Image: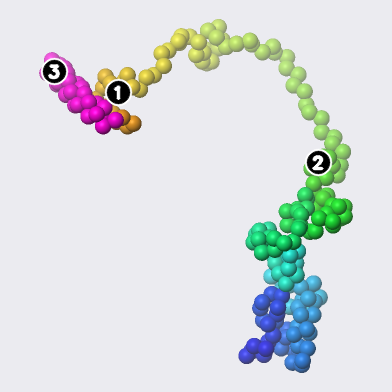
Amino acid sequence: AKPSGRLLCEILCKLCLRSHFLDFSTYRKQICLVNMNLQLLGAGNCDLSMQGYEDIVECPYNRAHQIMSFRMQTHLYKCRKNHKDLKFVKCPFNETHDLPEPELKYHKTVCPDRETFDRYKYCIRTTAATFVAEQDHATEEPRASYGMDGDADEESWDQYGKVKAYNPRAYASRHAVIRKCTGMAPSEKKAFKEAERKRLADLGNRSGQNAENN
């Protein structure tokens, strides 16, 4: 018993909210466990049932592991490593259903998640499909193409003809753009930088002459 007079529940690892009503006898731990089971089933007037503790699931590898249902998949990932000697298999309908291989055949017939799988596989619906796609009864024949003879608002890219592709290297070589020399050997980098200094100097002189002429 804790100093507050309450018992520590072995299931939730928390203080039982109803244990102070119990008689602290030799079997107080067993009484507390039974009491907590009633609380988890919603039979008791305990605040724990209002906090989602009714969704606790038992670990298939260790019965002492009482895990919340949304945490079971994370728990099983860790618990499988500690119980490698157990030859368990996974249920094809739910990854959190680990069980011995001899029980798998029977489990497939009673698994509660099989219904969702069958509905998806066989396209089972609650009501018959009554929707019929509407047909488009167009009275105007569509035009084959929108060229020069089309509407004035329509844009035709064919009228511009073929345009040469843009070459960024050629553009950079003719303008005052600083280029990088990545992936070159040290000697090649040195020659490239020297050629770049000369190229940029020539471009600067040309731009200065054009400014004076204007």
In x, y percent, where is residue 5? 67, 90
Q: Amino acid at mark 3?
A: Gln
Q: CA distance from mark 1 to mark 3?
A: 21 Å
- Mark 1 residue crowding within 10 angstroms, few (<14) / some (14–19) / many (20+): few
Disc sitting over residue 172 in the figure: 1
Q: Earlier in the sequence, mark 1 or mark 3?
A: 1
Disc sitting over residue 119 in the figure: none
- Mark 3 residue crowding within 10 angstroms, few (<14) / some (14–19) / many (20+): few
Disc sitting over residue 209 in the figure: 3
Which residue occupies 66% across, 13% down?
Answer: 142
Looking at the rendered image, the quarter that the N terminus falls into is bottom right
Q: Which of the pair 27/163 is nearer the observer?
A: 27
Task: Indicate whether 33 appears above or below 97.
Answer: below
Disc sitting over residue 121 in the figure: 2
**Mark 1 or mark 3, which is nearer to you?**
1
Compared across the picture, whether 127 is left or right of 10 comes to right
Looking at the rendered image, the quarter that the C terminus falls into is top left
Q: Earlier in the sequence, mark 2 or mark 3?
A: 2
- The secondary structure that most of the magenta stretch takes on is helix
Which residue occupies 51% across, 15% down?
Answer: 155
Residue 154 seen: yes
In x, y percent, where is residue 50? 71, 71
In x, y percent, where is residue 64? 73, 72
Q: Amino acid at mark 2?
A: Lys
Based on the picture, tell me whether residue 196 belongs to the magenta stretch: yes
In x, y percent, where is residue 67? 70, 67
User: What range of the chain is rendered magenta?
Assistant: 185-214
**Mark 2 or mark 3, which is nearer to you?**
2
Residue 57 seen: no
Q: Amino acid at mark 1?
A: Ala
Q: Which of the pair 90/16 is nearer the observer?
A: 90
- Mark 2 residue crowding within 10 angstroms, few (<14) / some (14–19) / many (20+): few
